[in-house]
Amino acid sequence: MYEKECPYCNLLADPEQQIIFENATCAYIQKPSEQTVLVGSGLIVPKRHAVDVFSLTAQEWIDTQELLMKAKAYLEERYGHDGYSVGWNTGKTGGQSISHAHLHVIPRFADEPYAGKGIRHWIKQEANHRRV
């Protein structure tokens, strides 16, 4: 399935976006570092229009893992990072802003402003704020 208006159904439509790796069902993409929150950030997206992670086929899961391991090696060659944030946002309430499954692969650095503040940090902040 292909959605004409979906930015991840037509990966070549955005000239700033680069396909770093791809396999039969998925692609690992990046934009220039100045357009990302953290240097080296990228996405793994299925080539087929899958609305969210729960729509992936068994083969897309296998191919996603293959690209995740390739992305890890690729990032480790280029950056002196100290960790990763890897994850899916699913549904509007879950933070998904584009209705096409995409796995965030974000290298994390000890000296960056968000160091040590993974997804659980923000959830805890929200929970503490609601308790007040």
Image (spheres, grey):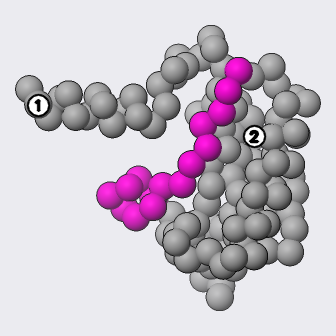
Position of residue 30 measured from the top left corner of the image (x, y, whole percent): 75, 48
Q: Is residue 71 visible?
A: yes
Q: Secondary structure at mark 1?
A: helix
Alpha carbon distance from label 1 to label 2: 40 Å
For the N terminus, the quadrant is bottom right
Q: Is residue 38 above or below residue 1?
A: above
The mark that comes first in sequence, 1 or 2, is 2
Position of residue 117 measured from the top left corner of the image (x, y, whole percent): 47, 25
Report the residue that reaches farthest toward the bottom. Answer: 1
Q: Residue at x 60, y 82 (%)?
A: 3
Position of residue 80 measured from the top left corner of the image (x, y, whole percent): 80, 19
Pointer 1: what residue? Answer: 131
In-image side of 97 versus 24 (left or right): left
Q: Does the magenta stretch mainly form a helix, a strand or a loop?
A: loop
Q: Residue at x 82, y 35 (%)?
A: 75
In-image side of 30 versus 8 (left or right): right
Q: Is residue 49 above or below residue 94?
A: below
Q: Residue at x 81, y 56 (%)?
A: 67
Foreground: 116 or 98?
116
Report the residue that reaches farthest toward the left. Answer: 132
Q: Magenta segment: does it hold 75?
A: no
Region of the chain picked out in magenta, as a range: 82-97
Q: Is residue 33 above or below residue 68?
A: above
- Amino acid under disc 1: Arg
- Amino acid under disc 2: Pro
The nearer-to-camera label among 1 and 2 is: 1
How many numbered callouts?
Answer: 2
Pointer 2: what residue? Answer: 32
**Is the C-beta separation of discs 1 and 2 under 8 Å?**
no
| Disc assigned to residue 47 | none
Q: Magenta segment: does it hold 91?
A: yes
